[in-house]
Image (cartoon, coloured by chain):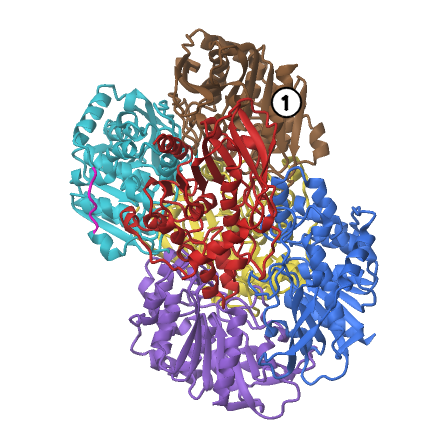
Chain colours: A yellow, B cyan, C brown, D red, E blue, F purple
């Protein structure tokens, strides 16, 4: 059934019980504190991307464990003053690609920082950042179950930490305006952006499109699609680890970050999205504690609003920055 | 088999017999002459796309039959001098979308004209241009068999005519440099670009990625994929029209335009491309009469070189324009 | 789930809200009046189909816009008196084929008129009738979204008008008994037959098998199959046209024709039919205002009752004609 | 690859080695002699099929082992003189259905006898004839491996015997002209028809469309489709029975019946037919020892020529009967 | 939806209405009495399976109709005293294979009797036992509809009778302890085991994993998978036999055997099992009249608990035998 | 096409060019020397697997990098003397599971050592061994491209080293006979076994079923199946790393280990195996330098000979050990 999830009216009211461990905040404070004990060492190297109206820098900085994380920093050519800055996180599987893959935001006048996702970037869009950590337990193919038996060992602990550090790295550039930083992403990128919105105080806003990494348990029961199916594959094998796995995932679930977010957010959701099902998106959205709007795309799958959503984002962002 | 077509060494030598009607040139001269008898009426309306470094115009002009064709015209903000100009044609199914879908070339400093493909633009990327002609014969779903029993009635006669007129429309803008026009496109867009390269004298070059609309008969025998399968569906039904159909298609086959092209061209081909199989691409390439290069992507399907090919194009284009 | 729709007990009671524009009747009166302003020009040409017990005529008449529509007229060999007459409309994609494709009704003693569906007839069964109108907006592959932004421009406005004119054309033949005309069709043909039953007064009955073109919105939300998916494809692209599209479709929705029908009808429905889901069929059936029966096939998909339903039809028709 | 088999020019010359046991003829003589030792007991019961121009009889006769086999006998209403008679065999899976499923030949003036295929008739089109023999070895789902370890026990020994007896049963009806009998069938029916053409002397002709049951070994190596895949499933399990299985099949392979046929035949073949691949059809055709013609459908799969082939058959049959 | 059936809490309470004929018990008494009128003739032939710690016998005995049924009898090497004995039935399609396919139970110290399933054993795992009965009605491919119009003629009447006789055959071996017999099976084997638990008094227990052959009607409405789909295929063709088919199946439905079972049972169920859906398993389990436990595997399909379930079985069996 | 690869006669002669780096041997000598610099620390803990005739030990030892690798050691209950010993490696994705998953060889009288494959064991069969190394480059999902840019960093460097150490670990047990060690595996396990046969001198033999990890480049061009498709996915993204990737893989390709093997080997191959295509298997087999036999399964896919091959293995092994 194309509209396989709850009807829209129910989705708008859907506030699932949250499954949260008592040390959720302590876990993240400890995690970020450890990361900040290491130097950031952000480097911005000018890069000839063949673009006459955009300046591009090839970036490296230290993320979790001091590992070097790649990125791009792009802004209107010749910028010398601080600009409102968007930090963008990437969808599952892909990497940072090349600068011409990320032109919209700099062409609209924003300083834009694209963070590579460690380990990923070998499916469709190339990345340049390894994840040197293999983890302390076996894993299903992909990244969703790497280290999934222990929150300290879990893959996304490293990624979310990288993502917070990416904001800090961006702000070392003189053209990034620390008072006007927006985090941004689609799918996995949206999940990361929401986590950063909760973990990094002082942002201006967040753009969270068809977010992944939220409502893990419901997703595994509702859809049989990649990448949530990685978890199903793992649990169908390690039948004795169900509770342990969902305990780990609770530290990374958007539903638990949402009530900790206070900055304005623009969400989007697609009602026929079998990859990130609408109830998991509304599960985050309805718990989101800041000012919020959501664009609903009725007849779309995980592609969501695509070019229409880009237009929505540009408009929303322009208003946010002006305000 | 992923490498389902001929081996690369054979592909490089593959020059298929061409199936060409004696009045091929006359057909196109007559067609274009008729189109040029109608006024072009190109209009450029400034459009707020929310992009600070790019100027955008919403364009309309008269294509085949005087029908209004939509497009975008984009260039670096504040341009006042004639720039080298790229006219881009679109892949099958999609439409012109929104300006932020086409940022690479203007961001690289080129005036860029995007032509909507009549009738199309209701699959993934929206278009704004109808094809008011339904044709004089029944058709399979899609556009490949619309009017396919008669070259005069065939859908692509209208599209290729629109495409020639699009170049002429672009050149009515003061920032388009008539001496430095390059046609460009991927898949269907590549097929159109190659036709224009043959039909419009005086171009500077052509960029033709994984072209469609070339080697029709071989394609229908070699791959069972959309959109070439539209022709198979038609012929599996109208079993008595095989020769008539391929006679019509011969007027639109890239293999017959290629030897009429003399401007420098950059092609690309993917060896695992089951949509536009490599032998059909090399069939055009090896007959192409101008200076030429081809980028070969071994492990790719119809996506071809993607971001890597964009980089190749920017480099090739920069060199071409400089020369 | 094979029984994916509502349970049968609920289906029998299911009377969906109808979405009908105030000018629904005016729209159709105006449409038919315009068509009738043009001459009908029905021609019946004897045709050698190699059948010794059936006489066959190759038919042409003027449908919407005066366009020539093809058909077959068949009746027991040597008939000279008026016979009860069945006008049959065709399922989606196919055309009128050859006379031996339509033997059941003439072999059972009925004058039978088969109407080609304009534009269609290039998928499996060949047709001979073009739709010369391409429409005033882009369209997804197929016919369901051709001209879908405007009821006046919509494809099925032309088809339903052709279908009313087909009845009138049939009745110009001396062996067709104007007082005993039954309309008939399966899938798309059933949808057309129901429309004609509402639009053409004075019929004797209607046979409507697993009808298509009814309950458009519910169908797009419930099944992900062709051809209803054409609408989903369109709306997934033209995300801003949802209400406009469903407004157009409301003029063509069987649910709105059903309460305007008063002649006896035999419906059929298949409970595992994912092409024309059972609730959309019952949505029409339960609103149908004439005497009615429905055959329910529990374990069937869109093929419905097939040879069993043919037997039901022959029996029902014999009783109807006798009464 | 749609044209996955040999090119047409090679197909026309393709005469595979035949794998034939020395007692092939003795096997069939013994088999038929045993069957003829049992009474035929053909019964023709008038049947009301609701058809005014065709007379219908529900038939039963004794096939292999004296088992009762069902059939239909149909002819133009009121026939009293012997007519040329077609005995039709059915495609795999289906049964005799209802009389209105078989109207073409009687409507064209032929007495027509439809033989049910024992055991089959529970996939799409219902049958009425069981196969009481389960066989002396395990079998894969379907009928192709029932009793496949021994020619005497093999399922098609019973079917082919039934088919010869069906001709004899038809000829007990006074309206069947013993001097003008044609056997006929498509797919499995074509395979049966060819066997009967070899086993029953004195026929007038044979119509063999896209025949199945010919070139077994090549088919299992060339296509991965049902029903030939039943043999692959069996051999993938019973890995030690390969030679025994193909020895059995050699008694039933059309390639071995073909050189024993002398009556005129009309074949058809589809070049994209992955169910009965073209080389297996040409393998029979090129060994066929009588006058022969073949219709080649280039762009079709197993549906072959469909309505076009029906027209070919009617024409060929009319000429044959006249001659 | 992976969790496509009822939620677990509802499943635990789900006790469907049973559809049982009044002569259910009489039918089975008569059936078994007839079988026991024939001699059992169990033979145990020592077999060299190349296993040093397990003794193996190739077994034959007379099942329904006196037909010879194959099996394996295996036990720890050198056993001379009666051991607790497990009679294992096999999943759908497969046969008894070779002794090394069945090592777990004999390696754990049990005498183990593996019964071949007549007719089956040509899909993946080879069998050696034919079903000589073809049945009195046509059938869909497979075994689920062989003789399905009549309980006396139905395939599983023969199989379940074989299964009861297999217990009796096992007990003719001096190392099988008649007071400690457990029946066992997975999928089809589980369905058979449950039937035997109802039909053969005096067992010690039953192990019933993800059982098939229970809840037939619900299964056909809920899942579209093999092998239940065989019934759907049959009913989609023989549309007039629905009630007759389900009447036959009611004599073989686990839901009707369950309340007749009194020995301790270990069930298992997988919540994502679309082959034997969880509600059909719980339908049996909740009606099961003996002491019972069920292992629930949340994230598994029809593979169920696999190696984990084997461990559960060994533990449960050890405790049962001790008690 | 089921027989999609070369014909058997060609396969038997197929000796592909080998692509081998000059430091191949040095690479492996250095790798193993480094591993042997670390302590082995093999531990054998008795484990209650509920099996009365088999003794089981839960094993740990240090593999590459000193990482702890899990395994099972199993042998006939009560063994006290050294036995011929088989070291078994596991197929891709799975882990060591539970002891009852590995009964055949110990039941046949062999000491059997099962090595867990690091990182794997979360698809179907659970494993207990992590791969703590994430690698120095991004990777596609799975293990085939983990560290694939550098032989020193490549995943299988660690696995093959573990595998050599597993032999050494097995030999620390007093019941393992150092003079009679056979390595063994299917698919990935076969690839590992062949590598060990080349790297560890003094074995008695090798059993290599349908081996994976051999003929990498040909496999990626010939089949589009997992897991070789992981490499295609990687190269389709990292289009600039083709030569670097195949250079790395050459150090791990069975084709390069084969000529370094001198012990007797039993191979198997399946001619319809699209996972490990037959030409890649014969590519190894024909280069294999020791005495060798190969079992060819014509109608099988990657399951190969299954229970039949087990029988072949037991027989071959018995003869080998006797000799």
F206 and B40: which one is in front?
F206
Q: Position of residue D174 (x, y in %)?
A: 52, 32
Q: Badge 1 local density, few (<14 within 10 Å), some, or many (20+)?
A: some
Numbered range of the magenta stretch: B14-19
Q: Position of residue D239 (x, y in %)?
A: 49, 67
Choose top left, top right, bottom left or bottom right for residue C5: top right
Q: How many marks?
A: 1
Q: Specify whether C235 is left or right of B291.
A: right
Residue annotated with mark 1: C316
Residue at x-position 38% and y-position 32%: D321
Q: Is residue A37 above or below residue B266?
A: below
Q: Specify whether F65 is left or right of E303.
A: left
Q: Residue furthest bottom?
A: F81
Main SS of residues in magenta: loop
Q: Where does the N terminus of chain F fall, quadrant-wise?
A: bottom left
Would you say residue D178 is visible in this rendering? yes
A320 and E128: which one is in front?
E128
- Chain under numbered label 1: C
Q: Position of residue F107 (x, y in %)?
A: 61, 81
Query: Does the magenta-highlighted stretch encompass residue D8?
Result: no
Q: Is residue B28 above or below residue D279?
A: above
Q: Is residue F88 above or below residue E271?
A: below
Q: Is residue D210 above or below residue B252?
A: below
Would you say residue A295 is visible in this rendering? no
A27 and C216: which one is in front?
C216
Element on which disc 1 rests: helix
Q: Position of residue C229 (x, y in %)?
A: 51, 35
């Amino acid at each position: 059934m194309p509209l396989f999830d709850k009807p829209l009216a129910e989705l708008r009211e859907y506030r699932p019980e949250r499954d949260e461990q008592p040390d959720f905040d302590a876990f993240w404070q400890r995690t970020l504190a450890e990361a900040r004990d290491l130097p950031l060492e952000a480097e911005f190297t000018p890069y000839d991307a063949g673009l006459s109206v955009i300046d591009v820098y090839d970036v490296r900085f230290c993320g979790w464990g001091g590992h070097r994380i790649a990125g791009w920093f792009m802004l209107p050519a010749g910028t010398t003053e601080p600009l409102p800055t968007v930090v963008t996180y990437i969808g599952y599987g892909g990497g940072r690609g090349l600068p011409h893959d990320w032109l919209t935001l700099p062409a609209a006048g924003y300083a834009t920082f694209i963070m590579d996702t460690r380990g990923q970037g070998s499916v469709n869009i190339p990345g340049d950042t390894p994840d040197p950590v293999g983890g302390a337990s076996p894993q299903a193919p992909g990244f969703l179950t790497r280290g999934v038996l222990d929150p300290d060992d879990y893959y996304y602990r490293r990624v979310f930490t990288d993502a917070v550090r990416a904001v800090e790295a961006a702000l070392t550039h003189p053209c990034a305006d620390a008072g006007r930083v927006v985090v941004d992403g689609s799918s996995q990128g949206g999940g990361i952006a929401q986590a950063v919105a909760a973990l990094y105080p002082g942002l201006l806003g967040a753009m969270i499109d068809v977010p992944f990494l939220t409502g893990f348990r419901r997703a595994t029961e509702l859809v049989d699609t990649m990448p949530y199916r990685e978890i199903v594959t793992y649990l169908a094998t390690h039948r004795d680890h169900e509770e342990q796995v969902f305990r780990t995932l609770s530290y990374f679930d958007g539903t638990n970050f949402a009530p900790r977010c206070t900055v304005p957010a623009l969400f989007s959701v697609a009602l026929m999205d079998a990859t990130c099902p609408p109830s998991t998106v509304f599960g985050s959205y309805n718990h989101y504690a800041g000012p919020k709007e959501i664009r609903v795309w009725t007849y779309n799958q995980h592609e969501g609003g695509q070019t229409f959503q880009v237009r929505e984002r540009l408009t929303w962002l322009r208003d946010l920055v002006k305000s």
